[in-house]
Amino acid sequence: MGRNAKATGDHSFAINLNAGTPPETPSRTFWISGALSIGGNQAWGTVSDTRLKKDVKNLGGKNSLEKVLQLDGISFRWKEEDKNKKIGFVAQQVLEIVPEAVRYDALNDIYSMEYAAIIPLLTEAIKEQQKMIQKLQQLLEEQQDKIELLNKNP
């Protein structure tokens, strides 16, 4: 659909909003090329039903925060006629840290990000930080009690 759209794979659908040639769309893929924004009154949903999952493991531990601290958020503009500044990540860098959030399209030799996959990592990193904050609060309270005790008994 659109000028030069290339839905070449089985069960694929492509929409091209660019003047240029879009990448080819592999099998079982819905691809919108050249959209600066996609809107409407409904948010995109992602299936997350536990009945459809296997090998489920909690991300909890001590490395979620470490991974988040390695990620570099960037601002950028797309090379093709884009005057609007964007923010995001570089997929190749994220691949080294959170490979589950990166996709590689071998047909078109393009890396892409699955940004929603970063959310569980951020959630676990916040939990790790909260534990650190609680320990520090407890230590601060203990030290404050000791200071008050020393002030009462000089």
Image (cartoon, rainbow, N blue to C red):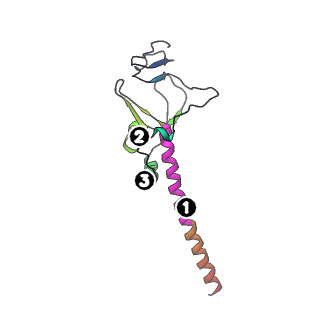
**Circle 2 residues within 10 Å: few <14, some 14–19, many ≥20:** few
The reply to whether residue 73 is in sight is: no
Q: Residue at x 47, y 23 (%)?
A: 30
| Residue at image mark 3 | 63
Q: Which mark is residue 133?
A: 1
Tell me which amino acid carries mark 2.
Answer: Glu
Tell me which amino acid carries mark 1.
Answer: Ile
**What is the quadrant of residue 21 in the picture?**
top left
Using the image, determine if residue 32 lies above or below residue 72.
Answer: above
Mark found first going from the N terminus, 3 or 1: 3
Q: Pinpoint residue 12: horizontal percent, then vertical percent.
A: 44, 20
Mark found first going from the N terminus, 2 or 3: 3
134 magenta-colored: yes
If the image is split into quadrants, where does the C terminus sit? bottom right
| Residue at image mark 2 | 100
User: Circle 2 sits in a helix, a strand or a loop, which is it?
Assistant: helix
- Residue furthest out toward the top: 3
Q: Magenta span covers which residues?
A: 115-136
What whole-number distance in Å separates the C-alpha atoms at marks 2 and 3?
15 Å
Q: Pinpoint residue 77: horizontal percent, then vertical percent.
A: 49, 30
Using the image, determine if residue 62 lies above or below residue 15.
Answer: below
Using the image, determine if residue 108 lies above or below residue 123.
Answer: above
